[in-house]
Amino acid sequence: MSKLRKSAKGRECQIRIPGICNHNNETVVLCHLGGAGMGTKNHDIFGAFGCSACHDVVDGRVNRGLFPQERKMWFYEAMVRTQKIWIEEGLIKC
């Protein structure tokens, strides 16, 4: 498991979809959007801290009435916030 994936444990959800986010730090993992092919994930640098409820929505496992573009917007904003945390903590360097 990468240091970036490990860093998600116990964190605050950065996806934060209103009315969906469960705000439970115990369920937060490093979420990925899309991938290079079926059954693959993007590199962890393109991940975001997300609770189980937000993760289910951005992955499309649960339909909560969001358009695909909305799911991507929530995810990409969370990815930027997650990367900012990693930069501040020295886990990634610019």
Image (spheres, rainbow, N blue to C red):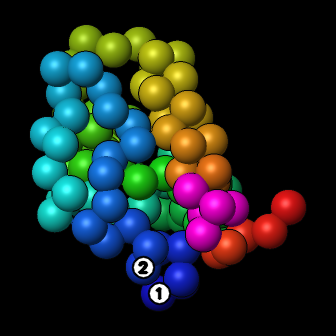
Residue 2, how many percent across, how many down?
54, 83
Q: Are the residues flagged by discs 1 and 2 in contact, CB closer than 8 Å?
A: yes
Q: Residue at x 54, y 74 (%)?
A: 4
Q: Front-most of 13 and 44?
A: 13
Quarter of the image for residue 53 reads top left
Residue 60, how many percent across, how many down?
33, 35
Q: CA distance from mark 1 to mark 2?
A: 7 Å
Residue 30's place in the image compared with 56, above or below, is below
Magenta segment: 85-89
Q: Residue at x 47, y 87 (%)?
A: 1
Q: In the image, is 76 to the left or to the right of 24? A: right
Earlier in the chain: of badge 1 and badge 2, it is 1
Numbered badge on residue 1: 1
Residue 80's place in the image compared with 83, above or below, is above
Give the residue type at disc 1.
Met
SS label for mark 1: loop
Magenta-colored segment: predominant secondary structure: helix
Q: Residues within 10 Å of mark 2 (few under 14, many from 20)?
A: few
Residue 2's place in the image compared with 32, above or below, is below
Q: Residue at x 21, y 50 (%)?
A: 52
Image depth: mark 1 or mark 2 in front = 2
Quarter of the image for residue 79 reads top right
Q: Front-most of 28 and 70?
A: 28
Whether 79 is among the magenta residues is no
Quarter of the image for residue 61 reads top left
Give the residue type at disc 2.
Lys
Q: In the image, is 18 to the left or to the right of 69? A: left
Q: In the image, is 4 to the left or to the right of 21? A: right
Residue 5, how many percent across, how many down?
46, 73
Numbered badge on residue 87: none
Residue 25's place in the image compared with 89, above or below, is above
Numbered badge on residue 6: 2
